[in-house]
Amino acid sequence: MNKLDKKTILAFKVKLEKMKHELTIEIQQNASQYYKERSSEELEHITNSLNDEIFIAEQNKKAEMLKQIQFALLRIKNGVYGICPKTGELINIARLKANPTALCNIKSQPNQEKNFTYSRHFNNI
C-alpha cells in the first residue's frame, strides 16, 4: 500500500480546512438569518412548519458534509488519508481532487460509502 506524498496531503489539508471554515460560517449565518427574519405575525403556521422542515433538512445536509470534512482531516492527522479503509487501496488522486472527502475509489463507492457512519469510525482511527 502506497501513501500520498506529504505535499499532496498538505494541499488537501489546506483545501479541507478552508471547506470546513466556509461551511461552518455558512451554517451559522443561515441559522442566524433564518431566525432573525422569521415572524409569526407574517407567516401562517403551516408555512412556518414547511419552512422549518426545509431549513432543518438543509442544515442537516451541511452538518453531514462538515462531518465528512472533519473525518478527512482526522484521517490526514492519522496518516491514512487517501487510503480506502476497507480495501487498503490508494484512492485515485483525480477522485480526491473532485471530492476531498472520498473514502474510496469510484468502483468501490456504492459498497463502501453508501452506509458509512462517520461517528462510528472517529473512534477507530
Image (cartoon, grey):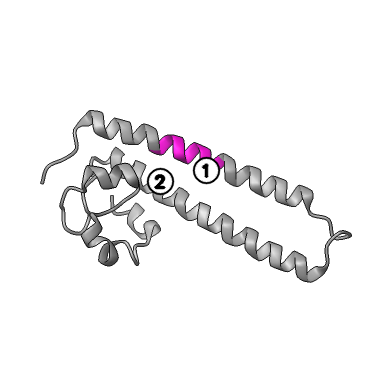
Q: Is residue 81 visible?
A: no
Q: How many marks?
A: 2
Q: Quadrant of residue 110?
A: bottom left
**Residue at point 40% right, 57% down?**
119
- Above/below status of 60 relative to 8: below
Q: Is residue 65 magenta?
A: no
80 to the left or right of 50: left
Res. 53 mark? none
**Residue at point 40% right, 51% down?**
68
Q: Please tell me whether the stretch drawn in magenta is mainly helix, strand or loop.
A: helix
Most foreground residue, 110 or 121:
110
**Residue at point 35% right, 67% down?**
115
Packing grade of label 2 (10 A; few <14, some 14-19, many >=20) is many
Q: What residue type is labelled 2?
A: Ile
Q: In which quarter of the image is residue 58?
A: bottom right
- Above/below status of 109 relative to 15: below
Res. 69 mark? 2
Q: Which of marks 2 and 1 is nearer the N terminus?
A: 1
Residue indicated by mark 1:
23
SS for dot 1: helix
SS for dot 2: helix
Packing grade of label 1 (10 A; few <14, some 14-19, many >=20) is some
In the rendered image, residue 103, in percent from the top left (x then y), is placed at: 28, 53
Most foreground residue, 55 or 63:
55
Q: Is residue 19 magenta?
A: yes
Q: Which amino acid does label 1 sit on?
A: Leu
Q: Give the range drawn in magenta.
A: 16-24
- Report, in whole angstroms, how far the alpha carbon at label 2 lies from the one at label 1: 10 Å
C-beta proximity under 8 Å, tags 2 and 1: yes
Most foreground residue, 70 or 56:
56
